[in-house]
Image: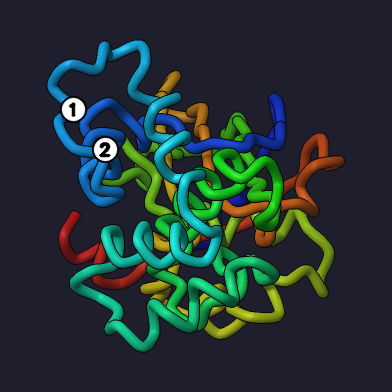
Amino acid sequence: MNTLYTVELQDFETILTLPNYWDKAKYKELLEVMDYGDTSEIADADLKDMCYMSIADNEPEEAARLILGHIFKDRLNEGQIDNLSNEMREEKMWEEYAEIGYHEDFFNTGQILYDAFNGKFPHPEAVEFTAKISGKNLADLLIDNKFSEAALIRLFSQGMPENTLINRLFNDQITGNSFEEAKNIIWQLETKKESDNSALVTVISSKYFFQDLKYVESFEGKTHNDEAEEEVD
């Protein structure tokens, strides 16, 4: 916990879609939700376009209701889905919904609605950035050669202004030993260990939380894993 780590941002970009989410299987599922009919004759190369056309055949709120009902069928009730299908025309639910564990799925829902309706829904934006993290005995911080989301957020928070959103919302978790929300804040994470003292990490998350890292080049900070993660390790 007392080790000082150096963080060097390698690149930072805004992305409009999340890798490895919408695929051929999911497009077929949505076509079924839209009552398209037999999808067996649709060429793989045409699935996305046919899916978007089928979505756009509905009114925007109805399309949102159908997609939300499919994605959140076991987590939201009918009344919640009806309300959200209207709210999504104006609100960025991947930033504003109270249950942070739903943000990634709201982003993917918002993205396909935005594209299918040519911008009639809010524009989803996420961020992808890569950083080199180095420090004495860095390997001791890794769990199965990977960074934990909690340790990374604690570290990255020190490279952003003190009043940045993530510091204001999660100060107790950042300074404490339990940060359950961390795995829902970071949507995708990849660690590439270079040596015992350095590793590259690539993070995909909401622009909402990490946009203040955009103009950062390097900084130093301390971090630690959750107590539960240390016990597992």
Residue 166 visible: no
Marks 1 and 2 sit apart, C-alpha to C-alpha, by 12 Å
Q: Identify the element where label 2 is drawn.
A: helix
Indicate how the structure is coloured in the image. Answer: rainbow
Q: Residues within 10 Å of mark 1 (few under 14, many from 20)?
A: some
The label on residue 26 is 2
> Which residue occupies the extreme bottom position in the image?
79
Instruction: Residue 96: give x, y in percent of width and height.
Output: 61, 75
Res. 37 image quadrant:
top left
Q: Which is nearer the eye, 24 or 52?
A: 52
Q: Residue at x 47, y 45 (%)?
A: 57
Callout 2, which amino acid?
A: Lys
Q: Which is nearer the eye, 38 or 151?
A: 38
Q: Residues within 10 Å of mark 2 (few under 14, many from 20)?
A: some
Instruction: Residue 124: give x, y in percent of width and height.
Output: 64, 50
Instruction: Residue 228: give x, y in percent of width and height.
Output: 24, 71
Camera-side mark, 1 or 2: 1
Q: Residue at x 53, y 42 (%)?
A: 204
The label on residue 155 is none
Callout 1, which amino acid?
A: Thr
> In the displayed structure, would residue 57 be above or below residue 28?
below
Quadrant where the C terminus sits is bottom left
Q: Which is nearer the eye, 196 or 107?
A: 107
Q: Residue at x 36, y 68 (%)?
A: 226
Residue 52 visible: yes
Q: Residue at x 60, y 55 (%)?
A: 155
Q: Identify the element where label 1 is drawn.
A: loop
Q: Which residue is mark 1?
A: 39
